[in-house]
Amino acid sequence: MYLHDTLQVCLCAVISRYPCHRLDLNTEILGLHTNDVKGWVVDEVVELLQAMCPQLLHMEADLVIDPGDCAIYLPFYSRTVPLCLLHCWGKMPPPCKHIPPKIEQWKPVALVAR
């Protein structure tokens, strides 16, 4: 599955196609200073981004789900470093409830092109 659209549309496509999914966030791109990066679901990520950096949801994104790669990329930032890795089949990380980071911990690197 390949989709080139906004980040919000790509995230909605993950929910639609793979309701039992997990996301591992890339703190380097998001600029988060937390170790709580594994086992997120799309609803939590959308809620986090809407609260902290809503313009990120409207950025161009590439959703790639194939046997060699399951990830979402922000081409504005990097076509090789994923924003998040997807777990949509096979062994899933356990579900967890994530606590959104404080606003002062948020420095979205993805808004600055490389």
Image: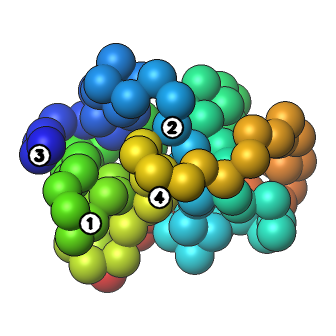
Q: Distance between the residues labelled 1 and 3?
A: 11 Å
Q: How crowded is mark 4: few (under 14 residues within 10 Å), some or many (20 or more)?
A: many
Q: Viewer-proximal residue, 90 or 68?
A: 90
Q: Which residue is drawn at 74% across and 47% down?
A: 94
Q: Are marks 2 and 1 in contact (CB under 8 Å)?
A: no
Label 1 close to label 3 by CB (< 8 Å): no
The span from disc 2 to disc 1 (Cα, nearest Å) is 15 Å
Question: What is the x, y in percent for residue 19?
Answer: 46, 23
Q: Kindly check if marks 4 and 1 are in contact, taking CB atoms under 8 A apart as contact.
A: no
Instruction: Specify which label sits upstream in the sequence, 2 or 1.
Output: 2
Q: Could you say which quadrant of the image residue 14 lies in?
A: top left
Element type at marker 3? strand
Q: What residue would you read off at disc 3?
A: 2
Q: Is residue 26 above or below residue 11?
A: below
**Residue at x 26% of width, y 78% of height:** 80
Whether residues under marks 2 and 3 lie with C-beta atoms below 8 angstroms apart, the answer is no
Residue 21: mark in rendering: 2
Q: Which amino acid does label 1 sit on?
A: Asp
Q: Disc 4 marks which residue?
A: 84
Horizontal and vertical percent for residue 104? 85, 55
The residue under label 4 is which amino acid type? Cys
